[in-house]
Image: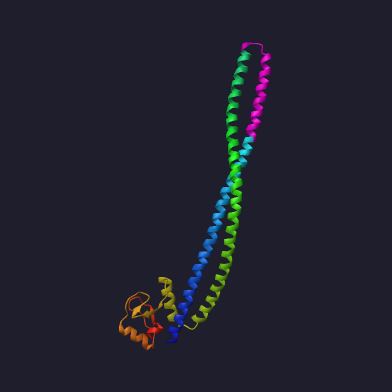
Amino acid sequence: MNEQLKHLIGLKEIDSRIRSEENQIKELSEKSVNLQDELAHILSDFNQKKEKLNTDEKDLRSKERRLDEINIHLKQLKEKIYQVKNAKEMDAIDEEVAKAKKEKVLIEEEILALMESVEGLSLQIKEEEQKFAQINSEAMKKIEECKVVLEEANKRFELLKNEKNEIIVKVDKPVLSEYEKFFRLKGDFGVCEVKNGTCQGCNVNVSSTIENQIKDNSHLVRCENCARILYLGEENE
C-alpha cells in the first residue's frame, strides 16, 4: 500500500477514536452538569419553602403580639367605661371598641391562615428534607461515577492525541492540509474505503478506471464525486 495512504488510514482511525472519546467526554460533562442543575433546582425550591416558613413564622408571632395588644386595649376600654362623664365620651369609647374589635377579627383570620400555612410548610419541608437527602446521595454518586469515567476518557483522549501527532509528522504537508481541510469543512474524514465498487463516503459507484488506479497504488486517488482519498478494503485488494 502507498506509504502516504497507509498513514492517512491510520490518521483516520485515530481521528475516529478521538471523535468517539470527544463525544463521550461531552456526554459525560453534560450529564454531570444536568445532575448538578437538577440538584440546584430542587435545593432552590426547598430553600424557598424554608424562607417562606421563616417569614410566615415571624409574621405569625407579630400578629399574635398585635392580638395581645388589641385584647389589652379592649380590656382598658372596658374599664374606661366606668369613668365616662358624658354621652360624647361614651360614643368615642364605643367607636374605639368597634374599631379594635374589627381589627381583632381581621388579625384572628390572618393568624389562622398563617398557622395553616406554617403547619403545611413544616410538613412539606420535613418530607422534602428526607427526599432531598436521598436524591442528593444518588445524584452525587452518579456525578462521582461520571467524574471517574470522564478522567479515564480524558486520559485516553490525550494518548490518542499523542498517537495522532506521531502519524502527522509522517504525512506530506499538502496531503495533510487537504485531509484537515476536508475534516474542518465537512466534519467527516477525507479518506474512505471502496467496497464492492462503491465509495463509502458518498455511496456513489466509482469508475473502473478509478478502481484500477487505486489497485495500481502508485499515487493517491480521489473519488470523482466527493473528492475523498480512496483505498480498497482487504477483501477487494
Please give left or right for residue 94 compared with residue 193 in the image.
right
234 magenta-colored: no
Tell me if residue 160 comes above or below residue 76 in the rendering: below
81 magenta-colored: yes
Q: Quadrant of the N terminus?
A: bottom left
Whole-percent x and y of residue 76?
68, 21
Q: Quadrant of residue 144?
A: bottom right
Q: Residue at x 68, y 18 (%)?
A: 79
Q: Quadrant of residue 224?
A: bottom left
Q: Quadrant of the C terminus?
A: bottom left
Q: Nearer the viewer, residue 34 or 162?
A: 34
Numbered range of the magenta stretch: 61-87
Whole-percent x and y of residue 43?
58, 51
Please give left or right for residue 97 compared with residue 166 in the image.
right
Q: Quadrant of residue 222?
A: bottom left
Q: Residue at x 55, y 61 (%)?
A: 32
